[in-house]
Image (cartoon, rainbow, N blue to C red):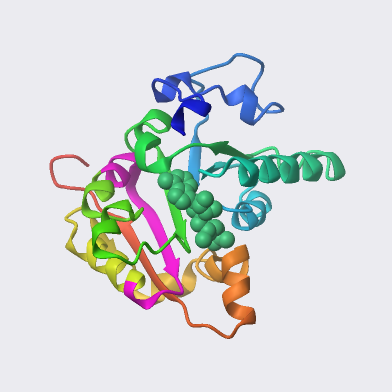
Amino acid sequence: SDSHFPVPTSPIHVDYSLHYPQIFSSGQVGSARRIQFADIGCGFGGLLITLSTLFPDTLMIGMELRDKVTEYVKERILALRVSNPGQYQNVSVVRTNSMKYIPNYFEKGQLSKMFFLFPDPHFKEKNHRRRVISPHLLDEYAYALQVNGIIYTITDVEELGEWMKACLEDHPMFEPLTDEELKADPVVGLLSSATEEGQKVDRNGGQTFQAVFRRIGMADSV
Ligand code: SAM
């Protein structure tokens, strides 16, 4: 249960030195350099590992509910840091329930990218409230994202893909990227190719459904 992992009371209490020890000295909180990418339900961490070297100056974090999976990702990052000195210092993972604690980790307008890749489908109507994309949670994501920040979603479950797209289309703070923008964004292709779930779907010849939206600025809040 949630009582088994600590939760920072607010984003300034997130200890960056635990996550990025080479970049932050011990005990430093409320640092100037902030996390910009969040992979929600990061699983085994494949996307983050790829993004770490692609965006070496950007701090990124995975949020994962399962304890053992989180420990695996931690070990994976530590091993990569050891075998590639100076690299993978910008990537970390935390065990948490992202549906409850996003505001504890990120300040308003902090994130430039959020990822929701192959989330659990929760098929039954009564379980839709447990989906990680919902009208209510999109309010929180819009708060954490900066203006022009991007939210990436992908799934192999068509019904969930339609749900996530509809939630984003209906939300006043998001607009879809154009086809040209999708083609120009090097991250879009990684949603399938760099994630463990995407690779599995690919091996089985399955279809995927993606929705990539931009956080827009309202006239009174830009
Ligand atoms: N994104 C990864 C990928 O594409 O390979 C993993 C996809 S896996 C099907 C979904 C992951 O989301 C699981 O590892 C699960 O433990 C995690 N998860 C589910 N609910 C969560 C929550 N409320 N907070 C954080 N992680 C969650």
Determine the residue located farthest toward the top in the rendered image: 27
Determine the residue located farthest toward the left in the rendered image: 220
* Residue 104 is covered by the magenta coloring: no
Q: Is residue 108 visible?
A: yes
60, above or below 202, in the image:
above
Residue 180: quarter of image: bottom left
* Residue visible at 52% across and 29% down in the picture: 33
Q: Nearer the viewer, residue 65 or 75?
A: 65
The span shown in magenta is 140-159
* Residue visible at 35% across and 37% down in the picture: 100
103, above or below 113, in the image:
above
The image shows a total of numbered marks equal to 0
Q: Quadrant for the C terminus, please.
A: top left
Determine the residue located farthest toward the right in the rendered image: 83
Tell me residue 22's x, y (percent).
Answer: 72, 28
Q: Is residue 41 visible?
A: no
Q: Nearer the viewer, residue 24 or 13?
A: 13
Query: Does residue 205 appear left or right of residue 21 in this picture?
Result: left
Query: Does residue 147 appear left or right of residue 173 in this picture?
Result: right
* Residue 150 is covered by the magenta coloring: yes
Tell me residue 51's x, y (percent).
Answer: 61, 54
* Residue visible at 38% across and 37% down in the picture: 102
Tell me residue 122's x, y (percent).
Answer: 36, 62
Tell me residue 120's x, y (percent).
Answer: 44, 60
10, above or below 2, in the image:
above
